[in-house]
Amino acid sequence: MSGLVKDNIFGSSGSVIEAAGGLSWQPVVTASTVTVGAAKGYFINTTSNACTITLPSSAEAGDQIILVDYARTWGTNAITIDSNGLLFQGEEDTYIVDYDTAGQALNLVYSGATVGWTPSSDIVNALEPVAPQTQKGIMAFGQDQASDANVSTSHLISSSGVVADDTTGVGTARRDVGAASYGGDKALFGYGIVSSVSSLKNLVSNSGVVAADVTGVGTARRDIAAATYGTDKAIFAYGQNSGGSKVSMSNLVSNSGVIATDTTGVGTARGDLAATGYGSTGQSIFGYGNTGSYVSMTNLVTNVGVIGTDVTGVGTVRRSLAACTFGGDKAIFGYGRNAGNLSMTNLVSNVGVVAVDTTGVGTTREKLGACSFGGDKGIFAFGVQNGGVGRVSTSNLVSNSGVVASDTTGVGSATNRLGAAGFSYAA
């Protein structure tokens, strides 16, 4: 079929050639500007930036354009409609037209010169996908009580917070590692010190099996922290390099566990800090640590892995603490060392605000591990008392409202200077 078509059911105008009926859907738009055409549909992805959408400069009644919020991010980065000289709902194009609701889909139809472009519908998809919750945890590597040697032993944590006995580890024994979840239901351990600093990594499957060493990417270092961001990716940051210098570099981890090369970090270089995720859209936070003196500063990380500048911290300055998420979207920093070992905690809201000190419950200690479990709870475990002697396997559960429970006698070898992360969607 060819020729001039008017009032056709597909809302198109102009010459028609032989083609499949309906709208022509275009590739996903990620740019900050796009010019759209009639009889087309567009998925607008504003994950990284807002987008200005320029409509055609001429149109005929019945022309149709559909715009869809591809990643449910219009609530964060809105779209702006430029009607390009034509009216939009009867108003000149000097008016600002924004759509800023997550999950929205906009069906624009040109009604003629009197009113111009008119949304025939601007519905919102009410179904907000909810990421599955991490159910189990793993703590591994570190330094043991009996021999003072580095170990590759691991301890699995059930979905009810029960710490399992030692599992003989795979990979090079080391301490002062970082650990985080990636890929939604898996984990990885990275960096640390063997006899010298390393950039080794060990992936952990969603059944808790630790894989053999993989030669890492980026500057070898110790006293590093790591956290999940964007729901399925991870970031390692800060630490101390082979020369003993504190660094502020970071390394992003893909959702398949691949560590990227160094990115020059933002914020004060330091080591012996803690990090964890928070928020409903996949942010994370690095906090506290040792710059040469102890600090309580924090650095927020966006859900695309960008580290923010220093935020003056709240609470007691300290190092050698741990952190984990709780309640689905909040976090907690706990324990550590100042003049002596501590059991205090600091809650973090779902927008990254650190609260003042709460006097902790349980044995004061430093160089421990923490991770989430059971979907919305957390656990602090292991560590060392008394300035480097007296390692423990004690654990303290964290409720989904951020309350730290009293000591639970631990299972397995007393260990410190270990890493911890959540894994598995299966309870």
Image (tube, rainbow, N blue to C red):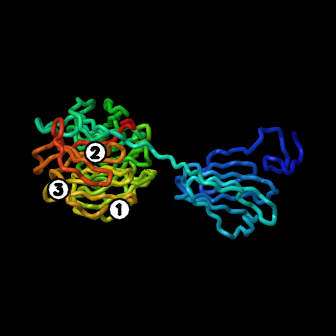
**Residue beneath label 3, please?**
342
Whether 255 is drawn above or below 404: the answer is above
- Taking depth in this image into account, of 206 and 35 the one nearest to the observer is 206
Is disc 2 in contact with disc 1, using a CB cutoff of under 8 Å?
no
Which numbered disc, 3 or 1, marks the residue that appears first in the sequence?
A: 3
In the image, residue 163 above or below residue 229: above
Amino acid identity at mark 2: Arg
Measuring from the top left, give residue 3's x and y in whole percent. Answer: 89, 45
- Classify mark 2: residues with Cα within 10 Å, few (<14), some (14-19) or many (20+): many
Q: Which residue lies under the disc numbered 2? A: 221
Residue 312 seen by the camera: yes
From the viewer's perspective, is 145 left or right of 368?
Answer: left
Task: Compare marks 2 and 1 and give the one earlier in the sequence.
Answer: 2
Circle 3: element type: strand
Q: Are marks 3 and 1 in contact (CB under 8 Å)?
A: no
Q: Quadrant of the N terminus?
A: top right
Near mark 1 (Cα within 10 A), the count class, few <14, some 14-19 or many ≥20, is: some
Amino acid under label 1?
Answer: Val
Tell me the residue that label 1 is attached to: 353
Looking at the image, is 75 positioned above or below residue 226?
Answer: below
- What is the three-letter code of the residue carrying label 3? Leu
Residue 250 location in percent, x, y?
A: 36, 49
* Picture coordinates of residue 92, whole percent (x, y): 73, 69
Distance CA(mark 2)–CA(mark 1):
29 Å
